[in-house]
Image (cartoon, grey):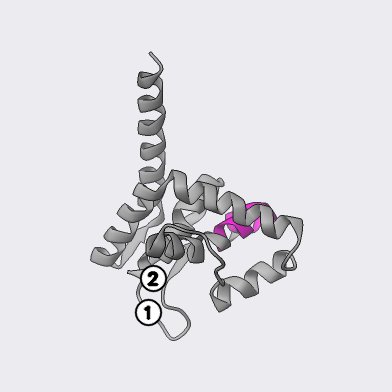
Amino acid sequence: MSIAHHEAGHAVVACAVGLGPAIREVTIVRTADYGGCVHFHQDQFNAATDSAVLTTLWAGCLAVRWHQDRSFRPVAMSHDDLNMANDIAPAHTPLWYSSREEAERIIKNNWPLIVAVADTLEDRKVLAGDVVWRSYVNARAASVAKSEANHR
């Protein structure tokens, strides 16, 4: 399930940082180049902030770690994620750390949705981006409604 949680982490965090509409598909179908991938509409992805992209890149390894032991102890990004991250910001810079912290917060707050996306990926292998985006929007709406009901 690690690959599914890795890709689900990327996808749900991408939604949370405003990249949800840019997701074309999420897959765990293994190819020669990768074990899974979140494919974006490149023009929308290229327009994203460095912070949004870096936070999304951190999410894969952090979601796997949270799945394994409910911690964010030191983790290493996958090789491909690390290469893309280093193109955005050198390691150990303020943006590097703040993006990781943001990814951790988003993962904790959206863990049930990450699990649901991962489980669906395990079953179907590929999810359309709009399905992930709608799931995120619906989950956030349900959370807001629950919060409002608790404050009445």
Q: Position of residue 120 (x, y in %)?
A: 27, 59
Picture disc at residue 111: none
Check if residue 49 falls in the magenta segment: yes
Residue at disc 1, secondary structure: loop
For image coordinates 37% across by 70% down, the residue present is 2
For image coordinates 41% across by 72% down, the residue present is 36
Q: CA distance from mark 1 to mark 2?
A: 10 Å
Image marks 1 and 2: residues in contact by CB distance under 8 Å: yes
Check if residue 59 falls in the magenta segment: no
Amino acid under label 1?
Answer: Arg
User: Relative to residue 116, is residue 92 drawn left or right?
Assistant: right
* Residue assigned mark 1: 30
Amino acid under label 2?
Answer: Ile
N-term mark: 1 or 2: 2
* Residue assigned mark 2: 3
Q: Position of residue 1 (x, y in %)?
A: 32, 69
